[in-house]
Amino acid sequence: MRPTLYIVIPCYNEEKVLPITAPMFLEKLSSLSEDGKISDNSRIMFVNDGSRDSTWDIICSLAKEDKHYCGVCLSRNRGHQNALLAGLMEAKDKCDITISIDCDGQDDINAMDKMVDKYLAGAEIVYGVRNSRKTDTFFKRTTAQGFYKLLEIMGVETVYNHADYRLISAKVLEHFADFKEVNIFLRGMLPLVGFKSTSVYYERHERIAGESHYPLKKMLSLAFDGITSLSVKPIRIITTFGFFVALLSFIGIVWSVIVAITGKSVAGWASLTCILCLLGGIQLISIGIIGEYVGKIYLETKARPRFIISQRTDTETDGK
Ligand code: UDP
Ligand code: MG
């Protein structure tokens, strides 16, 4: 039997780009269906992440125009990762496979054919990997690659140059639903679910219209969240560093005692000040990093809902 595919697309203030890319997604869905790869019950599901512009109105009129479009609306802006999770959780009971993709046309939709082929050949997760970043600006390319390197060094298992363009089977999503954490970083969490996975490669294009929602500040906070949600390596680094500093301090103590005994001690104001400043700085950074983990525990214990769906195009009713 042909699998039912849901293409899950988070949208935040995308009124400029949505009318251009929505028909492209529909065309792709039709061609996959005509090729006999997916069933005709497949859908394109938009997740409106609390947009302030007319994005939701566009989604509603698309849903009226063609039954292959549908959408859910979050009660407020929760960020890309939460919006995507909301879409995946909404889709998982209605389909056999999902493909998540941004709505700005940057990711090559033709890679979907290869993704579905890999699923039909037995893979449960298919990661879309960018094989070049020629169209990105030098700044975006360098910061993005630094981002993946940093994650790797800090012990987060991710697929290099893979963002959130991927195929996930409903079976994997069923198990992924048991990951109840509120600090989510999907591309680092999915490898933890396991199952057979593979990659397909594609060229990344420029944004068709509108502007990126990921400036450097947001990228840094995503990297920081990803690291502290998935790895305790920063705390281990602090511990190792602490031992190193303790060893140096011990040598310093021995040295100062010897100097004092041999009567060669002088007023060591400069060295004392330097050491105090250095240790003060290190301690503050360390407390900051540990504080980040404590903050995460605080948020996790609250276990607030990760998203609230306020409307759906198929029912137009309120509620979760
Ligand atoms: N997005 C979202 N909520 C947000 C920010 C972004 O749902 O708070 C969506 C956005 O509409 C797009 C995707 O996430 O479909 C990726 O965002 P963007 O293209 O701005 O990021 P970039 O590709 O520049 O990293
Ligand atoms: Mg983009």
Image: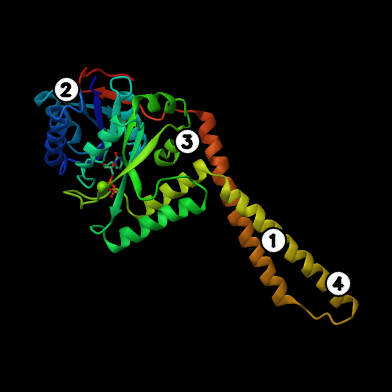
Q: Is mark 3 within 8 Å of ligand 1?
A: no
**What residue did someone put label 3 on?**
192
Crowd class of label 1 (few under 14; some 14 to 19; many from 20; radius 10 Å): few
Residue mark closest to the camera, 2 vs 1:
2
In this view of the protein, which residue sits in the foreground, 115 or 228?
115
In this view of the protein, which residue sits in the foreground, 246 or 120?
120
Q: SS of the residue at dot 1?
A: helix
Residue drawn 62% across the image and 50% down it: 236
**What residue did someone put label 4 on?**
257
In this view of the protein, which residue sits in the foreground, 132 or 93?
132
First in residue order: circle 2 vs circle 3: 2
Query: Marks 3 and 4: CB-CB under 8 Å?
Result: no
**What residue did someone put label 2 on?**
40
Q: SS of the residue at dot 4?
A: helix
Query: Marks 2 and 3: CB-CB under 8 Å?
Result: no
Q: Is residue 40 visible?
A: yes
State how far apart marks 4 and 1 are (Cα).
Answer: 20 Å
State how far apart marks 3 and 4 are (Cα).
Answer: 52 Å
Amino acid at circle 4: Val
State how far apart marks 2 and 4 are (Cα).
Answer: 82 Å
